[in-house]
Image (cartoon, coloured by chain):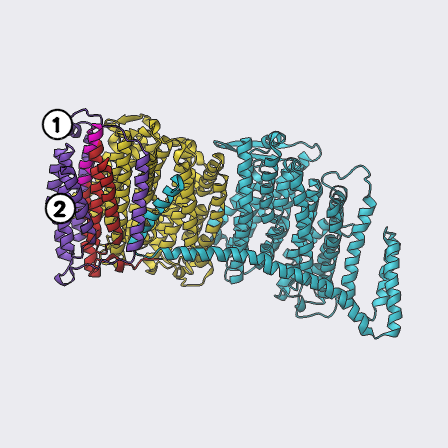
Amino acid sequence: MEIIVLSLILFGIGLFGALTRKNAIAILMAIELMLNAVNLNLAYFSHNLSNISGQVFVLFIIAAAAAEAVIGLAIIINLYREFHKIDVEEITLLKW
Amino acid sequence: MIFYFLAVTLILSAILVVTLKNIFHCALFLIVAILAIAGLYFHLQAPFLGVVQLIIYIGAIMVLILFAIMLTSRISDRLLQTASRQSIPALLAVIVFILLALKSLDKTPLPAHIGKNFDPILDLGRALMTAYVLPFEVVSLLLLVALVGAIALARKD
Amino acid sequence: MVVLIPFLPALAFTILIFFGFILKEKAPWLAIAALGGSFFLSLQTAFKLFPTGREINISYPWFSFAALSFHVDILSGWMLLLVSGVGLLIVIYSVGYMKGDPRFARFFAYLSLFCAAMLGLVLSDNLLLMYIFWELVGLCSYFLIGFWFEKPAAAAAAKKAFIFTRAGDIGFFLGILLLFLSVGSFEFKTIFAAAPALLPGLLTASTLLLFCGAVGKSAQFPLYVWLPDAMEGPTPVSALIHAATMVTAGVYMIARLFPLFELAPLTLNVVGYVGIGTAIMAGLIAVTQNDIKKILAYSTISQLGFMMLGLGAHSPHAGVFHLLSHGFFKALLFLGAGSIIHALHSNELADMGGLVKAMPVTSLTFIVGTLALSGMPPFAGFFSKDEILMAAYQRLPIGFWLALPAVFLTSFYMFRLCFKVFPGEVKGHPHESPLVMTAPLIILAILACGFGFFNPFGGAAEEEAGKLFVLFASLGTAFLGIFSAWLLYGIKIISLARYKQTLLYKFVAAKYYLDEFYIWFVGGLVALISRLLAIFDQRIIDGLVNLAGLVTQGFSALNRLFDIYIVDGCVNLAGWVLGFSGEKLRRLQTGYVQNYLLFIVIGIVIIWIIKFGL
Amino acid sequence: MSLFWPEGIVLLTACLVLVGDLFPRRVQPVPIALAGLGLSLLSLLVLRSGGSLAALAHNFYWFDLFSLFFKGLFLGIGLIIVMINIDYFKAQVKKNEGEFYFLFLISLLGLMIVVSSPNLLLIYLGIEIVGQSSYLLAGWQKNLRRSGEAAIKYFLFGAVASAIFLYGVSLFYGLTGSFDLSRLLVSPLLSPLYYAALIFMVLGFGFKIAMAPMQFWCPDVYEGAPIPITAYLSVGPKAAGFAVLLRFITLARADLIWLFALLAAVTMTWGNLVALRQKNIKRLLAYSSIAQAGYILIGLVSPQLGYGVVGFYLLAYALANLGIFAIVIYLSLILQSENIDDYAGFARRSPALAGALALFLFSLIGIPPLAGFVGKFLIFKAAVGSGFLWLALLGVINSVVSVYYYLNILRVIYFKPGDETAINLPAAIALAVMACLIGTIVFGLFPDLAGNFFLKI
């Protein structure tokens, strides 16, 4: 029970970070926090239900998170070459 | 006891990750948070997850992030502007979100702990090699996409 | 066989749209051949069916819950004749009218497709099929109204027509769905069989929804505003679409589904009152118009209102009879107007005059059409209008009394037009149109003269109470209209008395029911005038006559203001609200990705609160 | 094992394309991709006629008519996208062709995985494959700022969306002890948290279909991405998202229908209203696709009819949308502009293409006898049949509002004077437009052709 609340708070913190950080890499880090909250939930339920599939899912999420980080950073670096900044508040060519 | 220590560490470092001005410090506290979570995995009798967490998150993802930070920020502008235009609405929305979730959680009876024991490493390995073999193949595809795509996108032409 | 009727023009369309650029000047012959074929087949079908009263049903499987089913009975048989016959004449006429247009072949392709869709609509025996053809007809009219797309007004008018008719189609579509879900079939027969068992509320709701479609397509209040604008299209198009065929689709639909509408008396009342209201309003507006095609457009709206009145008075036969005769003479009037426009290159009444000398054939046929429209015996309009008034007199008395002013207005504005255009000095350099254009006029004029004598649905056999009264009331008001027009626009004021007396004489000779009243009224008026003539200056009479005209015109101007500011205003308001909210919502798309993320969270919170409360 | 042929062929083709790029004398990826997709489609048809249905790999993979239909749809979409991409790629993107087609094919494979699995783990991995490759493809025009911007926005939005989705998955797991969607059928727990989990998951899929409140990425990404990728995003991942939602809603009890009705109403109204004010064709099409997603969502309120109705609408929508995008690609190649106002006079430069564009737009509006009409008809019928008359009414009103902006495109290309020199048309684009046109007309006239083969309408 405590772990669910803990994970919820962690998720909320990550969400807050994703909503307010300006640096794209910092947003990526906040998203990692959210994913970790999910993993924590899954590990707890897996333990609680004595069911291995939750742990397996965590492994897959970690792998997917790694792939996501690689791709995200590639996109960010590519963006940096064009804009010379990675501040998402200033990357607003496309709007309305 | 150890649980509360890990929990407090986790929350504090997570808050620091999303509020600190220096992005390097953020990354360092993210490492602390990840370590705390690894500790929680051990606490939840999932040692394999803990190890994987250490190896992949710290060994791969965090290293990548630190590299990216160094590639994209000059020393002069390593400090982030923290005051986002929408800090206050975001804070309110997130708090309402958490409160609503807590209220739902309060009203929901969770399945009780079953207490059947399983061998965390042996069973995990067996599951991965039998029932989960298809997802296992698919996730390798995902990693291939990341590899090929990231190289193609990030290299200078 | 019957299926070939819409198929031939559809085939012509396919060939013309792809190979029109090869055929060029020869393109119309293909369209004429196809429509000629359709007309011939329709005639054949009619000869087979009409004497025996048999019906033809054809059905092919199409997809899971709808079949391609067609049905010919007397009603649809006559419609087939009207559409293919008038369509054929108009296509022939267009050969002359559209000569030299850069998209000559394209025009005939669209005309063929339009005829195919309209014939399909008439034949279809199931709601879904009817809806499909209904929309196709609307689509073709979009292309045809906007045919001269170089003119911005034409492009705007095409879009306006499309959007307004589609607004009506919302109701039509939902009505169809509602019926389908309560009956489980689109087939007319199944629906008619199941209808008596349905809840009255459901019946009323679905028929009202269906009527919405008719309001859009048949240009009834409050959706009629598109029709006058649609006059921006080539005149043959106006003749075909906005007089003889497309706008009648709504009337036809209600007549076709009459067994259903009959079970919903409330709906029929609505139909009748909307119809007569439209007839009066449009008639009043027509009085103020100075564009020859606009007058005809408002007149069409007004006549459609009459047809609706007929339907509302439980007499689909009267409505469709008027539909048919109106189809002939209104096509005639539009083509005549087209002939005049073709000669003078102007739509304005002010540019016209003395045409009876310069364009005798056009003028004479036009006058025949006018007489038919005004309901003068023995022209077609007289018989059909009379049937409607008769039906209204018996079953919708308020509608009948309201119809009389509309009858008055009809003859008034039409003769106003005639008096302005035909007699007097020749203006400009008009010349008679070529034979390819006048021949259809002559044929239509003959139809407008003779059609009334064979009432397609057998007419009312038994002597009905009040028949004579209705007859005289309508004729009297019609003559009053002609008379007023004549006073105002026909003659010089000097010769007023003499002409009036001749007219008076004719009245007496015809021995109409209202004779005494008329003699008293007009005679008294004449006597008064002649006495006043002695005393006062001529200008006072002039002033009095003008005053009468002014009152009429002022009233219709008010009506037009209502039209512009209230009806159009509501439409514009709706458009503005949509545009404005679009503009406001657009501003939420700030381009700032974290705003978007915040909106997600807010969205989740809102959904959560909706589901579980706070 | 033969059931895996379609996926296997696509995977093999992707690898061939990637490896072919490495040889000193480069192997052209386009013919390989076309051949592979064609072959895969063929094997799919063979499988369909074989009629073998099965659940494989420990219930991770289902071979049912539903997934076969969607796989066929994706392969068809893939073929058309490759065709319309050829000339655009040569003229605009130029670089990394092998990797481009590799990612594209893998992304198609991801879509096929998503629609075939009832298991949330595999669905998640499939979505990630589709998502990650789409983020990369959206940013493929490295020299263009807006392409990079599209990629980063798409990426950040997608990452947050998938985190929300996963959070829902974790709660679902905690309450049911399984990742299998068939657990929805038997779930005894109607607790608030369970609903919250379902809502999170629905929103996660909603990201792919640009459903409110997850639609914000859509216009920005559509405008910034290379046009063939925009075309792909507007049909491929969208169809997959709907496929998963369909599995979801048909397995769940009627508990969530109110949510779909609400979101459908908001989504279509939003898309249509904002589309009224757009000048850029890609942005306009983005809002139009949001609106169309709203209509399709209406179909979900009727679970028993959902499969056939939504499947058919997606087919009709994909045909029309791909046709429009093919023409837009062509226009952007000759005009170097995506501004609708610059299309003036196009009808006289190429009457055939303008006519095709008109037909596609009419199909999107829902004019009979085109496929879009049948789709709309089925959708609204399903809504009224499930007692959502208000939703059907709103949908029909919306479709009338949409007439305004669709016709606006026609007004510009037909009614505005502009450059009128005749122009020649690349064969591949012509072929793609032709295919979409034939499909739009044939499925409009004979809906059962699609219905009998794959769906039950």
Q: Can residue D412 be seen here?
A: yes
The residue singled out by tag 2 in the image is B32
Q: Residue farthest to the front?
A: B1
Protein chain holding label 2: B
Q: Position of residue C255 (x, y in %)?
A: 65, 40
| Pick the front one: D87 or B136 | B136
Kind of residue at badge 1: Leu
Q: Which residues are magenta?
A: A46-63
Chain B: give its colour: purple
Nearest the eye: D335 or C111:
D335
Which chain is in cyan here? Answer: C
Q: Is residue D132 magenta?
A: no
Quadrant holding the C terminus of chain C: top left
- Amino acid found under the numbered disc labelled 2: Val
Using the numbered discs, state the Cα–Cα distance from disc 2 to disc 1 in whole angstroms: 29 Å
Report the residue marked by disc 1.
B122
Image height of C610 relative to D139, above or below? above
Q: Chain of mark 1?
A: B
SS at badge 1: helix
**Residue C477 image-quadrant placement:** bottom right
Ranked by sequence position, the earlier of labels 2 and 1 is 2
Dot 2 alpha-carbon crowd within 10 angstroms: few under 14, some 14 to 19, many 20 or more:
some
- Of the chain colours in the picture, the one used for chain D is yellow
x, y percentage for residue C194?
60, 29
Q: Colour of chain A?
A: red
Q: Is residue A22 left or right of residue C60?
A: left
| Residue shown at the point (82%, 73%) measured from the top left | C538
Q: Does dot 2 land on a helix, a strand or a loop?
A: helix
